[in-house]
Image (spheres, rainbow, N blue to C red):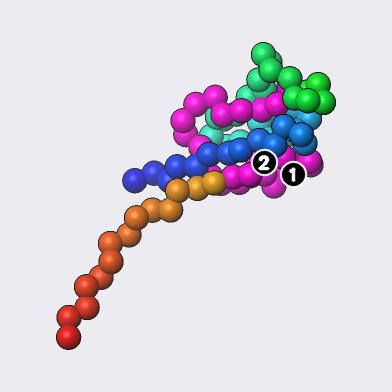
Amino acid sequence: MAVRGWIEVNELFCKGCELCVQHCPQEVMALDMEHLTPKGYHPIYLIKEGCTGCAICAVVCPEAALTVYREAPIRPVARVTA
């Protein structure tokens, strides 16, 4: 099962520099050209499924505007018999 992730963008900090878009290995991010942040920038958003939660986008973001989440895989619990 593939790991799924997603991001949240803090629009108060995102300046639309696109560093996260350029470094995303899954190519699932883009600028939202139809929306402006309170400071007048175009924020980024996920354009499709496929985010793995690798967090490269958050690491390269100079404004720390991204929070990355990753689903934890469900692992079977071993039964102990006495």
Quarter of image, res 44: top right
Q: Which residues are magenta?
A: 42-68
In the rendered image of this protein, does residue 72 appear above or below residue 65?
below
Label 1 is placed on what type of residue? Ala
* Position of residue 59 measured from the top left corner of the image (x, y, whole percent): 69, 47
Please tell me how many numbered marks the rendered image carries: 2
Q: Which residue is mark 2?
A: 66
Q: Which residue is mark 1?
A: 64
- Residue at left offset 22%, top offset 78%: 80
* Position of residue 32 measured from the top left corner of the image (x, y, whole percent): 66, 20
- Residue at left offset 45%, top offset 42%: 4
Secondary element under disc 1, as helix, strand or loop, is loop
Q: Which residue is outermost to the left?
A: 82
| Of residues 79 and 57, the one drawn nearer to the viewer in this rendering | 79
Contact (Cβ within 8 Å) of mark 2 with mark 1: yes
Secondary element under disc 2, as helix, strand or loop, is strand
| Of residues 24 and 38, the one drawn nearer to the viewer in this rendering | 38
Q: Mark 2 to mark 1: distance in Å?
A: 6 Å
Residue 23 appears in the rendering: no
In the rendered image of this protein, does residue 14 appear above or below residue 62?
above
